Amino acid sequence: MAGSVINETRQYLTFKLNDEVFGVDVAQVREILDSINITKVPQTPEFMRGVINLRGSVVTVIDMNMKFGLTVTEKTVNTCIVVVEVAIEGETTIIGALVDSVQEVFEIEPQNIEPAPKIGTKLNTEFIKGMGKKDEKFIILLDIDKVFSSEELELVQNTNNANPIEAQ
């Protein structure tokens, strides 16, 4: 993996999926929403839970547990949607990431970040920026721009551009 080297202190928003803690660069987070009604869109991948109306814009919601091969995110009082900006081919796409719970925002110094693990050639870990260490625990730092393939993001863009009335 040619992964990017993190050589400056950055702030990360951390969230939980099952019992694991993940972090995403706070600069790419637009907002955090309490779980709201998600409209299912027919014939989309299972991890695409549907769309929400975000102040008049259609935003696709991705179940991050399912995207990472875990179980379906169960709705609880802590379940929320992290609205992130994802860059693809020079364009910014807005995605809602459904997560089990949001933890905190904190800074990680570069010396507290280990490189992403190399897990053979068949497993793609390109979307992991590194492994942040905090209080003797690891936080998987995501490169949110690489979590989704270009085909998946094209599908998201097409869904976001669809008329929400037609999507129901």
Image (cartoon, helix red, strand yellow):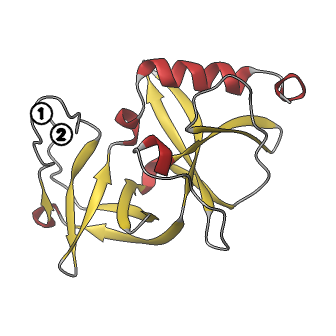
Q: Are marks 1 and 2 in contact (CB under 8 Å)?
A: no
Q: Which quadrant is home to the N terminus? A: top left
Q: Quadrant of residue 165?
A: top right
Given the current orientation, which residue lies at the most extreme front position?
71
Q: Which residue appears at 63% of the width and 26% of the height?
A: 44
User: What element does badge 1 sit on?
Assistant: loop
In the figure, 111 relative to 119: above or below?
below
Q: Position of residue 102 (x, y in %)?
A: 51, 68
In the rendered view, does 152 fall on the left or right side of 53?
left
Q: Which quadrant is home to the C terminus? A: top right
In the figure, 86 relative to 75: above or below?
above
Q: Which residue appears at 17% of the width and 79% of the height?
A: 136
Mark 2, Cα crowd under 10 Å, few <14 / some 14-19 / many 20+, is few
Q: Which mark is residue 69?
A: none
Q: Which mark is residue 1?
A: 1
Q: Position of residue 63 (x, y in %)?
A: 55, 46
In the figure, 121 relative to 34: above or below?
above
Q: Which residue appears at 43% of the width and 20% of the height?
A: 150
Give, as a three-letter code, the residue at label 2. Ser
Give, as a three-letter code, the residue at label 1. Met
Mark 1, Cα crowd under 10 Å, few <14 / some 14-19 / many 20+, is some
In the rendered view, does 16 fall on the left or right side of 146?
right
Task: Work out how far the residue at label 1 is from the one at label 2, CA to CA, in angstroms.
Answer: 9 Å
User: What element does badge 2 sit on?
Assistant: loop
Q: Quadrant of residue 79?
A: bottom right
Given the current orientation, which residue lies at the most extreme right position?
165
- Residue with the mark numbered 2: 4
Q: Which residue appears at 79% of the width and 40% of the height?
A: 39
**In this rendering, which labeled residue sits more in front, label 1 or label 2?**
1
In the rendered view, does 154 fall on the left or right side of 50?
left
